[in-house]
Image (cartoon, helix red, strand yellow):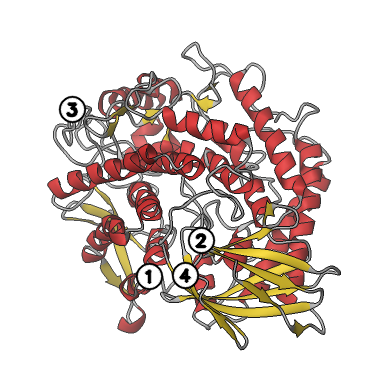
């Protein structure tokens, strides 16, 4: 293995390195307190209560600790992994003991019984993070394969039609798609005000005149009847996030069946998009016909163009393309999400007096003409206050809250995709050279652009600022724990997620050169990953801090600091899964051609080293295997 030895001595560790190591330690202490406060003596969450009957919320439980294995995999204390395992097993027991209206539990065979992949994508982030943290754990590997097997053609669950290359329902799971019954949501605690009045009526051919009428419980019941008729069967773009479940299984096993599933299913959606004039349709019937249950229209599907719009439609194409690039090395797959962004850009409207700093308001939804009075702040309206509708497109607003264009650039690192990032910049929103010290929304939108400003050299203070913000977020959660002094008075499905004291996004960016994964089911995509060969585990060794200072088409720059009291060795891997290869590595006067996906660095106590590495990206077969292993699953 190519080796580098640090020779520069430190007078004192830089501020970012001290903050980084302190953050690891502070969060480890907070996690132990969190478990003591918010889980019972059997490591089970306090939700759902014993008498609960329902189908929703299990993903929210898992979101309360989904990132603990990821922080362990970056160098966090063993407590992150130990507590994550215990919390997951406890949540599975609780979900298995919770009834649904269908006569079977919420969780069957350790997998949700029948849910959409917006929610299951969120919950399965834990599964993927466990692959990074513990790929030699037999339970982790067995679950990865068993979960993926639910979506193969011959599975008893009947979730997937291999001949037509389609997922057979907008809701699927361990019990199959036939339990997609929208009547089960009739008494959802959020009600019509959340699901419909804030998004608008999906169709214009019903007896309702305005979305406000959906607040009438009788009308809501009618709406669920129509949902069962039009949206309970067939495929939707959101199901493309199932590719992460398959990619996860491939990373554990190297079995080509999973790779072929990903590319076949992605190709099927690209063919449907081409047949639909270049716009991805949001509903496909079980026969393979676009609009089979919506009177032939390509819009009007569940989580589709006429309801949640691009925020939901964009998830699947982005995640699936990332996974296909990872598995095949072919960045041509990115043409799919890129084409959809270009459709929005082509139909956008410039807003702003200064043409240099005007913001492009792109349409987020598509539907028939009609009443579009609903709760939608920040969108363009007609002079009479009606939401602007033009050639079928409506809800024109900035691309601010969605990470899809950023992920497109990150995977390609092309100048054209970087221009798309700038083209969709919201000039009226937060300055890119500032960090918001309020906790971000759950998918972490916004800090990607401050990080990009750092990589561009425009925000050199970013490492300190984001780490300080993360420290502030952890402290705020610890303050809340002290104030509550135990289990909160009101326990719902979000109680763990709302109190989770672990914040990983800054660490991902700084140590691995990686953005927050697409929150609704994406895998970690990274430039680098670190391993501790002495302890034979993933992550930075104790006392060692890392800072990725540049990410370009050619490669990366990295600084490593050992501010601890002991000499350390570490292994740097190119890519989260060894998918990249080090072509040339320079450290000081030393220069070499490793032509491998891992290099070794020796860091005496009180030393630092900066290196520049050119990378041959997506050159290797990806795997969760540790860099000292010979094949997937080996130690």
Which label was assigned to residue 340? none
Nearer the observer, disc 4 or disc 3? 3
Q: For marks 3 and 2, give the CA distance.
A: 40 Å
Q: Quadrant of residue 546?
A: bottom right
Q: Residue at x 77, y 78 (%)?
A: 607
Nearer the observer, disc 1 or disc 2? 2
How many other residues sit within 10 Å of disc 3, few (<14), some (14-19) or many (≥20)? Answer: few
Nearer the observer, disc 2 or disc 4? 2
Task: Report helix, strand or loop for mark 3.
Answer: loop
Task: Report helix, strand or loop for mark 1.
Answer: helix
The answer to whether the residue labelled 4 contacts the one labelled 3, judged by CB atoms less than 8 Å apart, is no
Query: Which residue, given by chain and number where applicable, does mark 2 sit on?
Result: 575
Q: Quadrant of residue 159?
A: top left
**Residue extending farthest top:** 103
Query: Which residue, given by chain and number where applicable, does mark 4 sit on?
Result: 429
Q: Residue at x 13, y 46 (%)?
A: 275
* Total tally of numbered discs in the picture: 4
Q: Earlier in the sequence, mark 4 or mark 1?
A: 1
Query: Which residue, given by chain and number where applicable, does mark 3 sit on?
Result: 287
> As rendered, which of 398 and 69 lies closer to the eye?
69
Q: For marks 3 and 1, give the CA distance.
A: 38 Å
How many other residues sit within 10 Å of disc 2, few (<14), some (14-19) or many (≥20)? Answer: many
How many other residues sit within 10 Å of disc 4, few (<14), some (14-19) or many (≥20)? Answer: few
Task: Report helix, strand or loop for mark 4.
Answer: loop
Q: Earlier in the sequence, mark 3 or mark 2?
A: 3
Query: Which residue, given by chain and number where applicable, does mark 1 sit on?
Result: 421
Q: For marks 2 and 4, give the CA distance.
A: 32 Å
Q: Residue at x 52, y 27 (%)?
A: 111
Residue 340 in view here:
yes
């Amino acid at each position: 293995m190519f080796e580098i030895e640090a020779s520069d001595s430190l007078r004192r560790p830089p501020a970012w390195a001290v903050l980084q190591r302190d953050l690891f330690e502070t969060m480890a202490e907070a996690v132990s307190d969190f478990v003591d406060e918010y889980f019972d003596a059997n490591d089970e969450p306090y939700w759902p209560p014993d008498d609960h009957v329902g189908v929703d919320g299990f993903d929210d439980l898992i979101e309360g600790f989904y990132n603990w294995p990821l922080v362990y995999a970056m160098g966090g204390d063993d407590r992150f992994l130990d507590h994550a395992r215990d919390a997951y097993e406890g949540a599975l027991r609780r979900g298995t003991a919770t009834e649904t209206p269908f006569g079977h539990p919420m969780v069957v065979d350790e997998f949700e019984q029948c849910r959409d992949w917006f929610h299951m994508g969120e919950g399965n982030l834990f599964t993927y993070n466990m692959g990074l943290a513990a790929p030699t754990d037999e339970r982790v590997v067995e679950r990865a394969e068993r979960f993926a097997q639910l979506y193969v053609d011959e599975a008893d669950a009947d979730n997937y039609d291999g001949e037509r290359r389609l997922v057979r329902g907008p809701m699927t799971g361990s019990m199959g798609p036939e339990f997609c019954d929208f009547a089960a949501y009739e008494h959802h605690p959020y009600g019509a005000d959340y699901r419909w009045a804030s998004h608008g009526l999906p169709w214009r051919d019903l007896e309702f005149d305005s979305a406000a009428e959906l607040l009438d419980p009788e009308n809501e019941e009618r709406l669920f009847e129509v949902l069962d008729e039009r949206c309970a069967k067939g495929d939707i773009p959101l199901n493309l996030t199932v590719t992460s479940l398959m990619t996860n299984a491939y990373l554990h096993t190297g079995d080509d069946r999973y790779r072929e599933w990903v590319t076949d299913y992605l190709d099927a959606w690209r063919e449907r998009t081409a047949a639909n004039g270049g716009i991805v349709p949001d509903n496909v019937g079980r026969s393979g016909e676009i609009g089979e249950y919506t009177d032939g229209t390509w819009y009007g599907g569940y989580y589709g163009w006429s309801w949640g719009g691009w925020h939901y439609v964009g998830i699947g194409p982005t995640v699936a393309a990332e996974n296909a690039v990872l598995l095949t090395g072919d960045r041509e797959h990115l043409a799919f999400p890129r084409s959809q962004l270009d459709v929005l850009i082509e139909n956008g409207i410039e807003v702003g007096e200064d043409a240099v700093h005007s913001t492009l308001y792109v349409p987020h939804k598509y539907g028939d003409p009609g009443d579009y009075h609903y709760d939608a702040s920040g969108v363009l309206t007609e002079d009479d206050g009606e939401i602007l509708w033009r050639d079928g497109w409506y809800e024109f607003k900035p691309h601010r809250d969605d990470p899809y264009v950023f992920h497109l650039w990150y995977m390609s690192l092309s100048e054209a995709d970087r221009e798309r990032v700038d083209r969709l910049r919201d000039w009226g929103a937060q300055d890119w050279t500032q960090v918001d010290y309020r906790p971000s929304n759950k998918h972490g939108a916004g800090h990607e652009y401050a990080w990009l400003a750092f990589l561009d050299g425009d925000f050199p203070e970013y490492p300190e600022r984001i780490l300080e913000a993360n420290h502030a977020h952890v402290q705020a959660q610890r303050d809340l724990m002290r104030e509550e002094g135990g289990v909160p008075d009101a326990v719902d499905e979000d109680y763990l997620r709302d109190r989770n004291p672990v914040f990983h996004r800054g660490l991902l960016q700084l140590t691995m050169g990686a953005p927050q994964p697409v929150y609704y089911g994406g895998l970690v995509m990274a430039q680098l990953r670190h391993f501790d060969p002495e302890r034979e585990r993933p992550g930075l060794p104790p006392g060692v801090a890392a800072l990725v200072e540049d990410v370009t088409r050619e490669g990366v720059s990295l600084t490593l600091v050992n501010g601890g009291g002991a000499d350390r060795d570490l292994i740097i891997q190119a890519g989260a899964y060894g998918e990249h290869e080090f072509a040339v590595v320079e450290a000081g006067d030393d220069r070499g051609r490793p032509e491998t996906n891992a290099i070794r660095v020796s860091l005496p106590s009180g030393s630092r080293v900066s290196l520049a590495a050119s990378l041959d990206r997506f050159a290797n077969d990806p795997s969760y295997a540790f860099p000292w292993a010979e094949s997937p699953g080996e130690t």
